[in-house]
Amino acid sequence: MKKISTKIKVLIGILGFLFLIGLAVLIAWLVGGTAGISLMFNFISGQLLGMKWLNDVIGMAFTGMFGAEFMATIWGQAIQFFLYDVIKIIYLLCVLIFIISYIQSYFPPERTKLILEKRKGIVANIMGALLGTVTPFCSCSSIPIFVGFTRAGISSGVTFSFLISSPLVDLGAFVLLASIFGFPIAISYAVVGLILAVIGGTIIEKTGMGKHVQDFVLEGDRIDGDINELTKKDRLVYSKNQVFATLKKVWLYVLIGVAIGALIHNFIPTEWIQAALGEDKWYSVLVASLVGVPMYADIFGTIPVAEALFAKGVGVGTILSFMMSVTALSLPSIIMLSKTVKPKLLFAFIAIVVTGIIAIGYIFNALGFLFV
């Protein structure tokens, strides 16, 4: 009997997953119509992904230990917020990185290069952006991959679409966003992130800016290694190692992000936040975008801050602009990128991404009523 190819296995897995989702939606619709579908997704985002039951358990445990009076204070609520968010994010992070890494094991750089080389034009840029979503890298660790793609002769549009989407649109981040903000905002974030990546890569390619890379990038040796098929055990070991490696890299950012989120959520008055970043403030998106750039954090570290800002009534567009600027335009990544591309291309890249982030912020603030 012939062995089933890797591509067929992956396709069967994707189709099976989509079938289960469709079946669940159909059952929910048959039971309760559109209200049933809404209830199902709210349960998934709130209880399964958002783990709101955990917050209730922590609240009851702390009330038993410290009393209801202490838990009603700002400090009691801040401690509960911090502990709940840390446990939830770390747990989901480990589970998601394991699953994503297992999927990623089917797309080593050699196979990714072969997939991208077969595509041209806007289709290739879309493929580059989509492949960025299954690579759980921060903006700095994406740059060596970008260099490898450029050295392999892949078009500048594809490589920059990948470079933008890789830190920006992450499958793990999508699930965490859904757990906090719900699926509409999570889906919207993923869609606009991919659109920004595709448009950014297309502009850089069509304007000819992509040729302005440093000479050493083009002069390096092309890597055309063999694609080694991994066993199931190899993939499980790889996924486990990725969990520990990623957790080691981001745990501090998660703690800092949750601490800042707890501070905003419990100690800073809502009136102050809305006065600075309210939806009615025309400059809120600009402030959020500029504040995010100097920071260096994985997207997982920005989510607790975004959660606290959302609870204080900050506009969805302002929050998205903040998260995108932190993950796509951190100063360390810009410094690393400056070593591989010439100033003309670097400034073009920054200008395109900043313009896109600000435009997304204003558009989503204007359409914020859709997410209430």
Image: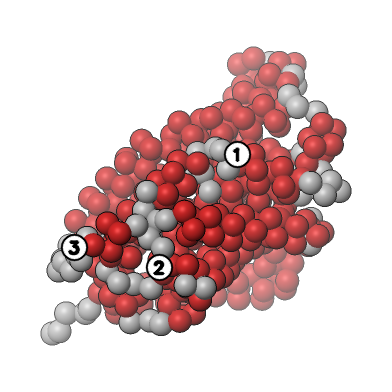
* Above-or-below relation of 9 to 200: below
Please give the label number shown on residue 304: 1
Q: What residue is disc 2 on?
A: 211
Q: Find out whether the residues at labels 2 and 3 contact each other: C-beta distance under 8 Å.
A: no
Q: Residue at x 56, y 34 (%)?
A: 257
Up the image or down, 43 lies above or below 153; here it is above
Front: mark 3 or 1? 3
- Look at discs 1 and 2 and give the one toward the viewer: 2
Residue under label 3: 221
Tell me the quadrant of the picture where the N terminus can be found: bottom left
Front position in the image: 18 or 222: 222
Q: CA distance from mark 1 to mark 2?
A: 39 Å
Q: Viewer-proximal residue, 226 or 95?
A: 226
Residue occupying image coordinates x 67% and y 74%: 29
Instruction: Report crowding for label 1: few under 14, some 14 to 19, many 20 or more residues within 10 A (C-alpha).
Output: many
Q: What's the CA distance linking mark 3 and mark 1?
A: 42 Å
Q: Earlier in the sequence, mark 1 or mark 2?
A: 2
Circle 1 — which element? helix
Q: Is residue 309 visible?
A: yes
Among numbered discs 2 and 3, the one appearing first in the sequence = 2
Residue 171 badge: none
Q: How many marks?
A: 3
Q: Position of residue 354 (x, y in %)?
A: 62, 55
Residue shown at 86% from the left, 48% from the top: 280
Under circle 2, the secondary element is helix
In percent of width and height, residue 236 lies at 25, 54
Q: Residue sitting at 44 percent across and 44 percent down?
A: 335
Dividing the picture into quarters, in which one does residue 303 lie?
A: top right
**What amino acid type is highlighted by mark number 2?**
Lys
Q: Is residue 292 left or right of residue 171?
A: right
